[in-house]
């Protein structure tokens, strides 16, 4: 179809739509991080280069072209950790959607997915409630479909049955294992003193290292991360890059059962 001096085809419409979709996804994944400013700067330089080329400013066009060519390589080298984090997040989001779609597709109608050994959820809730009452800081990562072996390998292997006294003793301030996170996988305490990736997003000032680590882990995995604040004695849960703060034990039960049933 033509509009005077414009000749717009269906391919052009698809092209614009795909580019807009890609830009939206990049914005969504980088929102609240320094990477968003970097992406915006790259886009501005590229748009300037396009305008300069359209105006046939050959010298400036050549200079900007060289800057863009070399700059892309420099960005890959300088921002390698951020790019790896972004690609990991992108892959995790794709895996989560695929697993969720397949689970809904093959789930019998009228039946909920049962969590194997769900009784340990009550144990975790009781331990978190006790630690919140005594303002004992805690960070518990509960695995779902994404394998947490890379995180487990960075900590101290335990492979023990889940019990409230065990969790409370691990996070006791004089315990050698209280720093870092506990990972629960397959209904067992897999490891303690695990190091989690910290979020690079802008977060409220009152967020401590545990909350930042909880958000970071929830961004790159599909795990549920429970945080007990040492300063305020409150409980929070992070999932998919979002955190629910100041929740009650009853609300924690709802979030864990819901999160582990899908």
Image: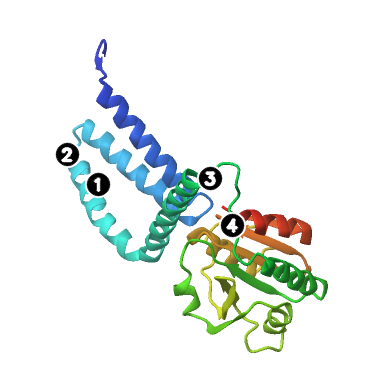
User: Horizontally, is 99 left or right of 43 in the view?
Assistant: right
Q: Residue at 67% across / 55% down in the picture?
A: 255
Which of the marked residues, 4 or 1, is nearer the chain's N terminus? 1
User: Horizontally, is 173 left or right of 103 in the view?
Assistant: right
Q: CA distance from mark 4 to mark 2?
A: 51 Å
Q: Say which element carries label 3.
A: loop
State the image quarter where residue 116 is shown.
bottom right
Q: Is residue 19 visible?
A: yes
**Residue 123 place in picture, x, y as percent:** 72, 71
Q: CA distance from mark 1 to mark 2?
A: 10 Å
Mark 3 or mark 1, whichever is nearer to me:
3
Q: Are marks 1 and 2 in contact (CB under 8 Å)?
A: no
* Front residue of 172 and 126: 126
In the picture of the structure, the residue carrying the numbered disc 4 is 239
Q: Is residue 120 above or below residue 92?
A: below
**Residue 121 place in picture, x, y as percent:** 68, 66
* Front residue of 100 and 221: 100
Q: Are marks 4 and 2 in contact (CB under 8 Å)?
A: no
In the displayed orientation, state which residue is furthest to the top. 4
- Which numbered tag is attached to residue 108? 3
Q: Say which element carries label 1.
A: helix
- Which numbered tag is attached to residue 83? none
Q: Is residue 248 visible?
A: no
Mark 4 or mark 2, whichever is nearer to me:
4
In the picture of the structure, the residue carrying the numbered disc 1 is 64
In the picture of the structure, the residue carrying the numbered disc 2 is 58
Residues packed near mark 2 inside 10 Å, few (<14), some (14 to 19) or many (20 plus): few
């Amino acid at each position: 179809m033509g509009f005077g001096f414009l000749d717009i085809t269906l391919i052009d419409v698809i092209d614009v739509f795909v580019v807009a979709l890609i830009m939206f996804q990049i914005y969504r994944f980088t929102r609240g991080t320094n990477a968003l400013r970097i992406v915006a700067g790259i886009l501005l330089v590229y748009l300037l280069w396009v305008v300069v080329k359209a105006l046939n400013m050959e010298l400036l066009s050549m200079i900007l072209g060289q800057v863009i060519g070399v700059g892309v390589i420099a960005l890959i080298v300088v921002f390698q950790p951020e790019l790896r984090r972004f690609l990991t997040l992108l892959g995790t989001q794709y895996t989560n959607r695929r697993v969720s779609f397949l689970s809904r597709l093959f789930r019998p109608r009228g039946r909920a997915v049962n969590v194997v050994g769900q009784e340990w959820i009550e144990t975790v809730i009781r331990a978190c409630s006790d630690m919140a009452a005594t303002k004992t800081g805690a960070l518990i990562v509960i695995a779902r479909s994404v394998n947490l072996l890379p995180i487990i390998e960075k900590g101290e292997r335990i492979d023990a049955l889940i019990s409230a006294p065990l969790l409370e003793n691990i996070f006791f301030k004089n315990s050698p294992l209280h720093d870092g996170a506990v990972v629960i996988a397959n209904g067992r305490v897999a490891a303690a003193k695990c190091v989690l990736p910290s979020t690079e997003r802008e977060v409220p000032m009152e967020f401590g290292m545990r909350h930042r680590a909880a958000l970071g882990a929830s961004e790159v995995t599909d795990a549920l991360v429970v945080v007990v604040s040492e300063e305020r004695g409150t409980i929070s849960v992070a999932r998919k890059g979002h955190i629910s703060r100041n929740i009650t034990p009853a609300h924690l039960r709802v979030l864990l059962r819901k999160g582990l049933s899908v």
